[in-house]
Image: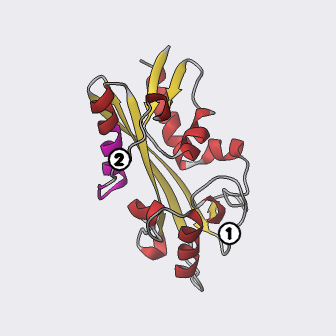
């Protein structure tokens, strides 16, 4: 059985994608490696940060691994919060504070178009490959729903009336930016 490490300390992300992963690939977490360090995400782009994390784990353990970096890009805010999505309202990360900051910045603004973007960096056999996924939508006027994490309760996917926070995990795993990028990764791994 193939083994691959998902190099993330965000266990919401890990739990979300483990349901998508095929049973013929053993998905391992950083906990499985007894790795508890914080990898500094010092990149200027989502791609930079994804590569920093996957390169770090690959170089330390010589194991096939992948990592992701995701961001919310809002038209009216010129792509903010973007690469700073997880700490938009400050450090330490606080999802509620981040959502409140976005809603405040968009108060009385009609253009609420937004996009979730995920970049996945895969380190495999001394090669690095990149996969991406995007989900178009808009920002709601209020926080709605208790499902998901991050900005899910304020993001309405295009074609839906509910936020990702209101949609079920099974629907989210079909349409989300991360799910789309993960499916590209899985398709690649399955042809090896």
Q: Is mark 1 on a helix, strand or loop?
A: loop
User: Which quadrant of the view contains residue 112?
Assistant: bottom right
Residue 76 x/y as whole percent: 47, 76
Cα separation, mark 1 vs mark 2, equals: 30 Å
Q: Give the magenta range.
A: 42-54
In the image, 143 versus 116, the foreground residue is: 143
Residue 164 x/y as whole percent: 66, 56
Is 179 left, or right, of 71 in this rendering? right
Identify the residue shown where x is 45% and y is 42%: 8
In the image, 32 versus 174, the foreground residue is: 32
Residue identifier under label 2: 39
In the image, 90 versus 3, the foreground residue is: 90
Identify the residue shown where x is 66% and y is 75%: 141
User: Which quadrant of the view contains residue 136?
Assistant: bottom right
| Circle 1 residues within 10 Å: few <14, some 14–19, many ≥20 | some
In the image, 160 versus 101, the foreground residue is: 101
Instruction: Tell me the quadrant of the picture where the C terminus can be found.
Output: top left
- Using the image, determine if residue 105 lies above or below residue 87: below
| Circle 2 residues within 10 Å: few <14, some 14–19, many ≥20 | some
Residue 22 sits inside the magenta stretch: no
Mark 1 or 2 closer to N-term? 2
Q: In front of the other: label 1 or label 2?
A: 2
Residue 159 x/y as whole percent: 67, 57
In this view, the residue farthest toward the top is: 1
Residue identifier under label 1: 143
Is 38 left, or right, of 15 in this rendering? left
Residue 47 sits inside the magenta stretch: yes
In this view, the residue farthest toward the bottom is: 108
Residue 125 x/y as whole percent: 30, 22
Is 118 left, or right, of 95 in this rendering? left
The main secondary structure of the magenta stretch is helix
């Amino acid at each position: 059985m193939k083994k691959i490490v998902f190099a993330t300390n965000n266990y919401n992300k890990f739990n979300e994608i483990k349901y998508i992963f095929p049973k013929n690939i053993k998905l391992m977490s950083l906990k499985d490696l007894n790795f508890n360090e914080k990898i500094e995400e010092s990149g200027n782009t989502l791609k930079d940060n994804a590569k920093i994390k996957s390169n770090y784990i690959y170089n330390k353990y010589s194991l096939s691994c992948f990592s992701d970096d995701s961001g919310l890009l809002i038209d009216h805010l010129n792509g903010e919060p973007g690469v700073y999505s997880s700490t938009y309202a400050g450090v330490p990360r606080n999802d509620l504070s981040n959502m409140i900051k976005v809603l405040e910045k968009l108060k009385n603004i009609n253009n609420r178009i937004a996009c979730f973007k995920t970049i996945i960096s895969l380190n495999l056999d001394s090669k690095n490959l990149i996969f991406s996924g995007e989900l178009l939508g808009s920002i709601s006027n209020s926080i709605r729903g208790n499902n998901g994490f991050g900005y899910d309760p304020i993001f309405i996917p295009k074609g839906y009336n509910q936020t990702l926070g209101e949609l079920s995990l099974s629907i989210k795993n079909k349409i989300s930016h991360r799910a789309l990028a993960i499916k590209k990764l899985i398709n690649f791994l399955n042809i090896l």
